[in-house]
């Protein structure tokens, strides 16, 4: 027989079809299996199914999710970093942050990334492969299980490794399944998707009818600086990227966020802040300013703390709403892709 079915990649209808056509079981079995999948159970743990039926599932299917193989807990703040392993052994990372209003998971959408941003560790070896929707949902399921005690992930940010809009179909399918009544119960209003600015896909995404907050990684106030640090800026001009963000908010009514990582002597001057304010003038947008989390393979440096304040103050003075995003979990390799690389290096040394 051909490839096994990946259970977590099936939506409600597809799971029903599998149960009917492959397992030749009545429809209520699909609900039973769906509940187990959401609870993070293995096939062998689906104890309201007979042994023979579980055997048949093994013969025809795999879970297709993600499992936590390493957890690092921050000593400084309520942050945990996970390494998730896929069924083919590929590893991605995720971060869980807990605040008074719930638990937020920063999720990966690809193994590696092909966008090539100069400051990011996830892209150092290019794209390995896309994650399937089941592997993305699997990260949430695994973290819910790790949280335990009925606690679950309430907010999702697609800001782990990968460019979500470069894995368009799987990401959209995953988002459509988030607020299934029988599903993970995450409201799309609590989801943020971050993109380096793939303008065509941003426009396509604005027509999906998904009330997700869109974040645009700008990191520069003009094309000249942006092209030095983000290869995507050679394909799309900065004004086009900002215009696409504006169209997104106009069409969806959702908030727009601009992300701006400050890199010393590259994009952190007060003049850059003024130019950024000019670029965003008249838009309903919020700027998240974050200090670069330096990646050891790169020569780029974090800004001086005083520079971060000056940058924020300048934006404020120009009437642009902005906040400094805390760089959480710094003691646990918080920056994108760093933990996965460290793990890989360790394994290679063994
Ligand atoms: N591909 C998506 C998601 C990437 S990660 C995107 O480009 O938006 C989420 C954010 O972290 C992006 O804004 C990304 O540019 C930023 N980032 C990546 N590496 C970083 C680092 N070392 N320090 C600070 N921000 C970083």
Image (cartoon, grey):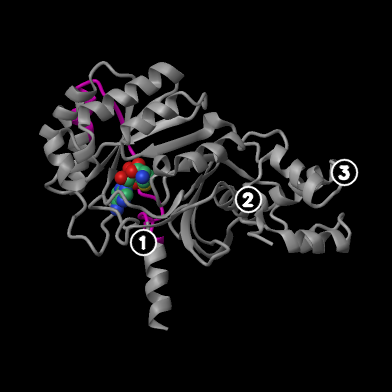
Name the residue located 19 percent from the left edge and 22 percent from the top edge.
318
The picture places residue 123, in percent across and down from the top left corner, at 32, 56
- Image quarter of residue 197: top left
| Image side of residue 343 versus residue 181, left or right | left
| Image side of residue 87 versus residue 162, left or right | right
Residue extending farthest to the front is 1
Residue closer to the observer: 165 or 319: 165
Residue closer to the observer: 237 or 148: 237
Q: Secondary structure at mark 2?
A: helix
Residue matched to label 1:
338
Marks 1 and 3, the one that precedes in the sequence: 3
Check residue 316 for magenta coloring.
yes
Residue closer to the observer: 135 or 179: 135
Query: Whole-Å distance between the Cαs marked 3 and 2?
Result: 26 Å
Query: Whole-Å distance between the Cαs marked 2 and 1?
Result: 23 Å
Name the residue located 10 percent from the left edge and 33 percent from the top edge.
271
Q: Is mark 1 within 8 Å of ligand 1?
A: yes
| Image side of residue 242 versus residue 140, left or right | left
Q: Nearer the viewer, mark 3 or mark 2?
A: 3
Cβ–Cβ under 8 Å for marks 2 and 1: no
Residue matched to label 3:
26
Name the residue located 56 percent from the left edge and 46 percent from the top edge.
133
Q: Secondary structure at mark 1?
A: helix
Marks 3 and 2, the one that precedes in the sequence: 3
Compared to 151, does 336 lie above or below?
A: below
The picture places residue 249, in percent across and down from the top left corner, at 39, 21
> Which quarter of the image is occupied by the C terminus?
bottom left
> Which residues make up the magenta segment?
312-336
Q: Is residue 141 in view?
A: yes
The picture places residue 252, in percent across and down from the top left corner, at 45, 20
Residue matched to label 2:
141
How dense is the environment of label 1, judged by Cα within 10 Å: few (below 14), some, or many (20 and up)? many
């Amino acid at each position: 027989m051909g490839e096994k079915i990946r259970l977590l990649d099936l939506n409600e209808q597809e799971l029903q079809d599998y149960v009917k056509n492959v397992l030749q079981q009545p429809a209520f079995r699909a609900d039973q299996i769906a509940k187990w999948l959401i609870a993070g159970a293995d096939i062998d743990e689906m104890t309201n199914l007979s042994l023979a039926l579980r055997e048949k599932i093994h013969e025809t299917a795999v879970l297709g999710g993600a499992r936590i193989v390493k957890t690092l807990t921050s000593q400084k703040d309520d942050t945990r970093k996970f390494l998730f392993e896929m069924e083919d052994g590929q590893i991605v990372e995720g971060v869980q942050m807990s605040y008074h209003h719930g638990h937020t998971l920063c999720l990966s959408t690809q193994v590696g990334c092909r966008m090539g941003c100069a400051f990011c560790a996830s892209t150092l070896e290019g794209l390995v492969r896309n994650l399937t929707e089941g592997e993305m949902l699997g990260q949430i399921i695994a973290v819910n299980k790790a949280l335990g005690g009925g606690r679950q992930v309430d907010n999702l940010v697609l800001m782990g490794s990968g460019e979500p809009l470069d894995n368009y179909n799987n990401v959209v399918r995953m988002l459509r399944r988030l607020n299934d009544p029988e599903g993970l119960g995450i409201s799309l209003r609590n989801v943020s998707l971050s993109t380096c600015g793939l303008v065509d896909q941003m426009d396509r995404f604005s027509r999906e009818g998904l009330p997700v907050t869109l974040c645009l990684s700008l990191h520069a106030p003009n094309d000249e600086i942006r092209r030095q640090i983000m290869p995507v800026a050679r394909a799309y001009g900065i004004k086009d990227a900002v215009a696409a963000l504006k169209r997104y908010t106009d069409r969806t009514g959702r908030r727009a966020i601009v992300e701006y990582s400050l890199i010393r002597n590259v994009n952190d001057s007060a003049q850059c802040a003024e130019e950024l304010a000019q670029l965003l003038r008249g838009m309903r947008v919020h700027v998240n300013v974050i200090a670069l989390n330096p990646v050891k393979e790169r020569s780029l440096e974090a800004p001086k703390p005083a520079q971060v304040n000056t940058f924020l103050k300048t934006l404020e003075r120009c009437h642009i709403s902005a906040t400094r995003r805390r760089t959480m979990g710094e003691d646990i390799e918080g920056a994108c892709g760093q933990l996965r690389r460290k793990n890989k290096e360790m394994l290679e040394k063994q």
